[in-house]
Image (cartoon, rainbow, N blue to C red):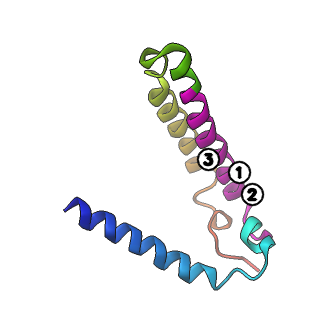
Amino acid sequence: MLATAIVCYLLGTMALGAWSSRMVKTSGDFMLAGRQLPLSLSASALFATWFGSETIFGASSEYLKHGLLGVMEDPFGGALCLMLFGGIGGQYGCHDRRFFLVSQT
C-alpha cells in the first residue's frame, strides 16, 4: 500500500514536471515564472523557501548544541508560524483572482 502510494506520487510528480517543462523557454521563465506571478503568491513562495531552509539548518544546529531537547519545540513553532501565515493569506489574498497562477491580461 505504501509502496503504491510512493510510486503514484513519483509518477505524478514526473508527469507534472514533463507537462510544465513545455512552458519554460528561458532560465528567466524557470526562475521567475515569466514575471507573471502576483505579489501575494511571490511573497508566499519566498516565505516558504525561507521557512524551510531555516527549519532545516536551524534545527540541525540546535540539535548539535543541545540534543533532542533543543529541537523538541521546533515543530510546534513551525506549525504555529504556518497557521498564522495561512490565516493572514486566507483573509487577504486567496479570494482575490490575482492570487492564482492564471494571468489576468
Instruction: Give SS at disc 2.
Output: helix
Q: Which residue is denoted by mark 3 in the rendering?
A: 48
Compared with 89, 4 (above or below) is below
Please tell me whether residue 83 is drawn above or below residue 90 in the rendered image: above
Task: Identify the mark nearer the N-term, 3 or 1.
Answer: 1
Question: Residue 102 in the image: x percent, y percent?
Answer: 65, 75
How far apart are the two marked residues, 2 and 1, measured between alpha carbons? Answer: 6 Å
Q: Earlier in the sequence, mark 2 or mark 3?
A: 2
Q: Residues within 10 Å of mark 2 (few under 14, many from 20)?
A: few
Q: Residue at x 61, y 34 (%)?
A: 57
Q: Which residue is mark 1?
A: 43
In this picture, which residue range is highlighted in magenta?
34-60
Give me the residue at 59% from left, 25% from top. 61
Residue tagged 2: 39
Image coordinates of residue 48 in percent, x first then y, are 61, 47
Residue at 57% across, 35% down: 55
In contact (CB < 8 Å): disc 2 and disc 1: yes
Tag 3 secondary structure: helix
Q: Nearer the viewer, residue 14 or 51?
A: 14
Of 59 and 34, the residue lying toward us: 59
The residues tagged by marks 2 and 3 sit, at their Cα atoms, a distance apart of: 14 Å
Q: Find the distance from the CA under tag 3 to the CA under tag 1.
A: 9 Å
Secondary structure under badge 1? helix
Amino acid of disc 3 = Ala
Q: Residues within 10 Å of mark 1 (few under 14, many from 20)?
A: few
Q: Amino acid at mark 1?
A: Ala
Q: Are marks 2 and 3 in contact (CB under 8 Å)?
A: no
